[in-house]
Amino acid sequence: MHFEQGNIHDFTLEEPADLIAMNRALHHVWEHDRAGIFAWLYDNLKPGGYAIIWEPAWPAERSALRDPARRTLSFQNLSEHIQGNHLLQPEEIVAAFAEQGMPTEIYRFAGGNQTVIVARR
Ligand SMILES: C[S@@+](CC[C@H](N)C(=O)[O-])C[C@H]1O[C@@H](n2cnc3c(N)ncnc32)[C@H](O)[C@@H]1O
């Protein structure tokens, strides 16, 4: 296993990867070039390889934020907007992988406030 560091908007791997993990980074690059990021993930994975995406889980219904357990998400999204980002619904990420023909599984944790999405090329 080895690690590489770079700007995903301008990043080249020497060879396709078995696994690419993005931990709480996708919402930072989504607005800039969503389609390009997902095409990059597809192009840089081996057939059968996995993308594993950890993201905060913005709820589909805003009324869900009234649950005290969701308040931290509200405040995080406020600070994300100041940076030009926004938190993503897991379903948006699943739809973006579907555009690449990549099936996904969604795993929720931290009381449903966080999600790991596993996508297979
Ligand atoms: C909320 S931090 C998450 C850091 C760490 N992965 C974690 O889970 O603790 C968001 C990360 O996204 C990275 N990031 C933002 N834009 C990026 C880009 N264009 N290419 C690569 N990484 C980027 C930042 O460098 C930052 O480390």
Image (tube, rainbow, N blue to C red):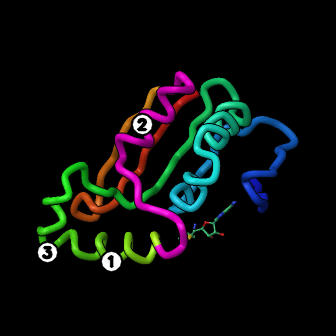
Instruction: Name the secondary structure under disc 3.
Output: helix
* Residue type of the residue flagged with mark 1: Phe
Q: Position of residue 18 (x, y in %)?
A: 67, 38
Residue 68, labelled with which disc?
3
Q: Mark 2 sits on what residue?
A: 94
- How far apart, in angstroms, are the residues tagged by discs 1 and 2? 24 Å
Q: Would you say 22 lies left or right of 62 here? A: right
Q: Position of residue 10 (x, y in %)?
A: 81, 51
- In what quadrant of the picture does the C terminus appear? top right
Judged from the image, the secondary structure of the residue bearing numbered disc 2 is helix
Q: Amino acid at mark 2?
A: Val
Label 2 crowding class (10 Å Cα cut-off): few <14, some 14-19, many 20+? some
Q: Which residue is mark 1?
A: 75
- Camera-nearest residue between 61 and 22: 61
Residue 49 vertical placement versus 7 (above, below): above
In the image, ligand 1 is in what quadrant? bottom right
Residue positioned 29% across, 58% down in the render: 109
Q: Earlier in the sequence, mark 3 or mark 2?
A: 3
Residue 33 lies, in percent from the top left, at 64, 47
Asked whether mark 2 and ligand 1 are closer than 8 Å, the reply comes as no
Mark 1: secondary structure: helix
Q: CA distance from mark 3 to mark 2?
A: 26 Å
Q: Is residue 72 above or below residue 98?
A: below
Residue at (57, 41) in percent of width and height? 51
The residue depicted at 18 percent of the width and 65 percent of the height is 65
Identified at 36% across, 46% down, the residue is 90
